[in-house]
Image (tube, rainbow, N blue to C red):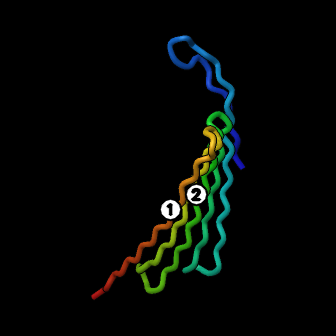
Amino acid sequence: MLSEHNINALGLPAQDLDTELYSANLRLVLNPRILFNTFYQYNSFDKHGQWNLRLSWEYMPLSFIYLVFNNIQTDLFDPMTQKKQCISKITFLKQF
């Protein structure tokens, strides 16, 4: 887990703002061809949290299937805003 904070002398009025940025990353490997990676980040200044989940599978040498899920959530506004995305990608390489 990584934590960062504080922004000093921001803008023309040279304001000091306290903000904290938290992030965590987890990588799980079932075997050399299947990988699951997850990343979470939270920013306390704008109350913004973000998940990123990715599954990759090498089904043939240098050919992959990727599944990615993103979830972005902001508590700054009322009501809370949330955006979800699901992305997939298939690559195929034929070697001669």
Residue that extends furthest to the left in the rendered view of this protein = 96
76 above or below 85?
above
Q: Which residue shows up at 72% across the image and 50% down it? A: 1
Q: Between disc 1 and disc 2, whose residue precedes? A: 2
**Three-letter amino acid code at the position of disc 1:** Gln
Q: In which quadrant will I find the C terminus? A: bottom left
Q: Residues within 10 Å of mark 1 (few under 14, many from 20)?
A: few
Q: Which residue is mark 1?
A: 85
**Three-letter amino acid code at the position of disc 2:** Asn
Question: Along the line of sight, which residue is nearer the eye, 34 or 39?
Answer: 39
Q: Which residue is mark 2?
A: 71
From the viewer's perspective, tell me whether residue 66 is left or right of residue 15. left
Secondary element type, mark 2: strand
Secondary element type, mark 1: strand
Dividing the picture into quadrants, the one containing residue 9 is top right
Q: Which residue shows up at 34% across the image and 81% down it? A: 93
From the viewer's perspective, tell me whether residue 84 is left or right of residue 2. left
- Residue 90: horizontal and vertical position, in percent? 40, 77
Q: Which residue shows up at 55% across the image and 80% down it? A: 33
62 above or below 1?
below
Q: Are marks 1 and 2 in contact (CB under 8 Å)?
A: yes
Dividing the picture into quadrants, the one containing residue 32 is bottom right
Q: Which residue shows up at 61% across the image and 50% down it? A: 73
Residue that extends furthest to the front in the rendered view of this protein = 79
85 above or below 67?
above
From the viewer's perspective, tell me whether residue 61 is left or right of residue 73. left
